[in-house]
Structures are given as structure tokens and as C-alpha cells.
């Protein structure tokens, strides 16, 4: 696994050919597959659940990175773990007991991630950092692909990187929303190591070119 990871988001894939899309981004160099779960309750959109994850699990060894935009969170976590998730991240506002949810994800054998909306403060991390394996900074408001990167996110990415550095642990710092070959360098300079990209890859017409140009722009890869 490289130190910088590119995670195509299936949200922008062609759902009528999901398996082929997974194969295509994996052959184009995807390090992770980002799987956006939306419930039309926590976010105003509806996507897919554990059964769809289970159907793509046999297609690849690439880790499956599940981004839960659902409320409540806890009941569905074991289902995603059983379906083959490797990473499960959730929004702290969507859980009644953030510490318990983080433990539950790890007990189910997955890396545990906490996701920060643009207006969500990083101090949710303060008392649970030892239970976090990944911090995911949203650089758009969650719910839809194809939105523009919010520049203020760069400040937050730097702050998150500083908090992670204090732990001395290899916590991943992922950024999600509006990532493109043109801005990925600034995002990596701010301290991110894992980059979700949906429309920039799936709407590009050439997945290999899109992923390769993102990787080429990464700083310190
Ligand atoms: C938004 C999702 C993102 C989305 C990113 O709620 O969490 O993962 O797919 O799409 P782009 O890269 O098009 O902004
Ligand atoms: Zn996402």
C-alpha cells in the first residue's frame, strides 16, 4: 500500500455496470474503493447498502472504504463488516455514542473512521483519538457527487494533520469532495494522505489518465 492512496467513489460510477466499473478503476490503479452509503435521512439522497457491498467484494482485493451517511449508525455496522468492508467511517452527529460506535467498528474487524462535515469541529476527536484509525475531512457538504471543493477545508486538513502528529500513530487522513488533478497537490500539501474522487474519475472518460494524473500531482508520494 503506498503512503498516498487514491479512492475512487462509486457514487459517480454507472450503477447498471457496477462490477465492470470496479474492475476498471482497480486496473486503472485505485488503492481503495470508496463506498458512499446514503439513507435519505441523515443526507438527502439514497444509494446502496451491505448487499451491494457484498456483491462487489469478490471482485477485488482492494480495501473497501465504507463512508456511512446514515442515522442511526450502530445497527448497520456488523452488516457492513460481514459484507466485507475494511474501513467504516461515520459522522459523529449521526451517533448517540461516538466512543461506542468507534469500538463497535473495531470489534467487527474494521478500521474505524470519524467524518467531519465542513461545519463540524475537530474537537469531536479530543477524547476518542486512541480509537480512531482514520479521519475523513469532507470538503463538500455530504449527499451528492460533483460539488466544488470548499477552499476553507485546507485549514481544517492542516489542523487534523497536527492533531494526528501529536498521537504518533499512523492514523490516515482522508479528504472527500471536489478532489481533482488540479487541486490534489494543495490537498496533499495540507497533510492529506488519502483522496476520494468520484466525478473527477468516473466522468473523465479515461480512468487510467485521471488516476495517473492525480498520482503525478501528489506531493511526497
Ligand atoms: C459526497 C460523497 C463523496 C462524493 C465525492 O457525499 O461522500 O464521496 O462521491 O464526489 P466528487 O469527487 O464528485 O466530489
Ligand atoms: Zn464519501
Image: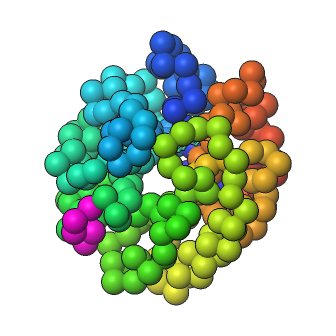
Q: Is residue 48 left or right of residue 215?
A: left
Q: Residue at x 44, y 81 (%)?
A: 123
Q: Where does residue 81 sit, x and y in percent of width and height?
A: 26, 44
Q: Quadrant of ligand 1?
A: top right
Q: Residue at x 55, y 57 (%)?
A: 138
- The residue nearer to you, when weighing 154 against 118, is 118
- Magenta-colored segment: predominant secondary structure: loop
Image colouring: rainbow
Q: Is residue 9 left or right of residue 29?
A: left
Q: Where does residue 39 sit, x and y in percent of width and height?
A: 33, 39
Q: Report the residue that reaches farthest toward the top.
A: 16
Q: Specify the segment rendered in magenta.
A: 95-99
Q: Residue at x 38, y 55 (%)?
A: 89
Query: Residue 21 sits in which quadrant?
Result: top right
Would you place residue 163 above or below residue 171 in this image? below
Res. 88 visible in picture? yes
Q: Is residue 216 left or right of residue 23?
A: right
Q: Where does residue 87 sit, x and y in percent of width and height?
A: 38, 51
**Residue 213 drawn in magenta:** no
Q: Residue at x 35, y 49 (%)?
A: 42
Amino acid at each position: 500500500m503506498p503512503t498516498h492512496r487514491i479512492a475512487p467513489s462509486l457514487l459517480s460510477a454507472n450503477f447498471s455496470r457496477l462490477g465492470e466499473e470496479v474492475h476498471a478503476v482497480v486496473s486503472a490503479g485505485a488503492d481503495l474503493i470508496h463506498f458512499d452509503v446514503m439513507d435519505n435521512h441523515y443526507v438527502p439522497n439514497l444509494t446502496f447498502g451491505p448487499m451491494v457491498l457484498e456483491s462487489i467484494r469478490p471482485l477485488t482485493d482492494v480495501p473497501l472504504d465504507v463512508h456511512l451517511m446514515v442515522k442511526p449508525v450502530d445497527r448497520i455496522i456488523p452488516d457492513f463488516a460481514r459484507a466485507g468492508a475494511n474501513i467504516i467511517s461515520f459522522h459523529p452527529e449521526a451517533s448517540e455514542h461516538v466512543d461506542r460506535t468507534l469500538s463497535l467498528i473495531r470489534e467487527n474487524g474494521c478500521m474505524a473512521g470519524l467524518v467531519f462535515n465542513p461545519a463540524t469541529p475537530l474537537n469531536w476527536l479530543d477524547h476518542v483519538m486512541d480509537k480512531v484509525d482514520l479521519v475523513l475531512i469532507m470538503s463538500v457538504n455530504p449527499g451528492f457527487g460533483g460539488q466544488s471543493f470548499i477552499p476553507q477545508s485546507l485549514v481544517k486538513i492542516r489542523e487534523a494533520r497536527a492533531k494526528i502528529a501529536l498521537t504518533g500513530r499512523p492514523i490516515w487522513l482522508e479528504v472527500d469532495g471536489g478532489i481533482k488533478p488540479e487541486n490534489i497537490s494543495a490537498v496533499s500539501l495540507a497533510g492529506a494522505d488519502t483522496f476520494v474522487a468520484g466525478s473527477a474519475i468516473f466522468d473523465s472518460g479515461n480512468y487510467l489518465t485521471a488516476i495517473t494524473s492525480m498520482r503525478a500531482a501528489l506531493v511526497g508520494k
